[in-house]
Image: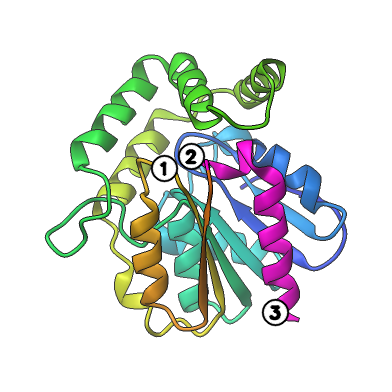
Amino acid sequence: MYIEVIGHGPALVLIHGWALHGGVFAPLAERLAPHFQLHLVDLPGHGASRDDATPLTLPYVVGAIAAATPPAVWLGWSLGGLFALHAAATLPQVRGLAMISATPRFVRGPDWPHAAEPHVLEQFGQDLGSDYRGTLERFLALDMLGADPTRGELRGLCQSLLARGEPAPRALQQGLELLKRTDLRRALPGLSRPSLWLAGQRDRLVPAAGMLAAAALAPAAEAQTIAGGGHAPFLGHANEVAGALRRFIAGLR
């Protein structure tokens, strides 16, 4: 599994979302690298780990990341939040947990109303499979609507994300199954690590209300909603997200 290491300071592991790779954190990494040693993971089947045959399941992936990284705060965005949360609940080397637009359960249920309908994830998966570039461009444009980056910055980010190629078809399918079937809510009451939950105000895939509900289940949790933020608030509001992370990690010391 490919893990890029940059920066100096306390260790921070960053795990990306479905169908992307660690390069999506570029705006955030630029702001955090002077303060932390960043471990930017490319999940199996994604980016530089496209040919990694490790099954995209929580125990396998978390074990592989833990074996390759020092004790650290783990940050998960979107799908990556499931891996980070599982690690925080099972591994002593996780010092703290940061969840960005991530939740213990991504699909709606009778007792979990603030989540996406399964058909929304299915359609997104079909779009990625049939037109990956177009779907990525639309996602970035919508997510940064009304935010700071210029059109040129948006184009540059899209090109950098495409430079590592499309995810393997098996990774798309395995990621979809994880999003549809995983429910880690039972792990939250026993979570002994402090946690930070950052939601995007405009996020339709992981509504802010769902993240607030999840944070309420965990001890030593704090939650914040990024005004104007979408599903990837660190793209359009990188300064605000980086500031929240720095304050949270400083509090752990």
Q: Is residue 214 above or below residue 154?
A: below
Q: Secondary structure at mark 3?
A: helix
Q: Is residue 251 magenta?
A: yes
Left or right: residue 38 versus residue 59 is right
Q: CA distance from mark 1 to mark 2?
A: 4 Å
167 or 204, which is in the foreground?
204
Q: CA distance from mark 1 to mark 3?
A: 28 Å
List x then y, in percent, for residue 224.
53, 61
Which SS does the magenta portion mostly show? helix
Q: Is residue 163 above or below residue 184?
A: above
Whether residue 251 is visible here, answered yes or no, is yes
Q: Residue at x 43, y 64 (%)?
A: 59
Left or right: residue 161 versus residue 218 is right
Q: Nearer the viewer, mark 1 or mark 3?
A: 1
Residue flagged by tag 1: what amino acid is it?
A: Asp
Earlier residue among tags 1 and 3: 1
Residue flagged by tag 2: what amino acid is it?
A: Gly
Residue flagged by tag 3: what amino acid is it?
A: Leu
Q: Residue at x 50, y 32 (%)?
A: 143
Whether residue 70 is visible here, answered yes or no, is no
Q: Residue at x 38, y 34 (%)?
A: 172
In this figure, which residue is indicated by the disc labeled 1? 203
Q: Nearer the viewer, mark 3 or mark 2?
A: 2
Quadrant location of residue 48?
Answer: top right
Q: How many numbered marks are there?
A: 3
Mark 2 and mark 1 in contact (Cβ < 8 Å)? yes
Which numbered disc covers residue 252? 3
221 or 33, which is in the foreground?
221
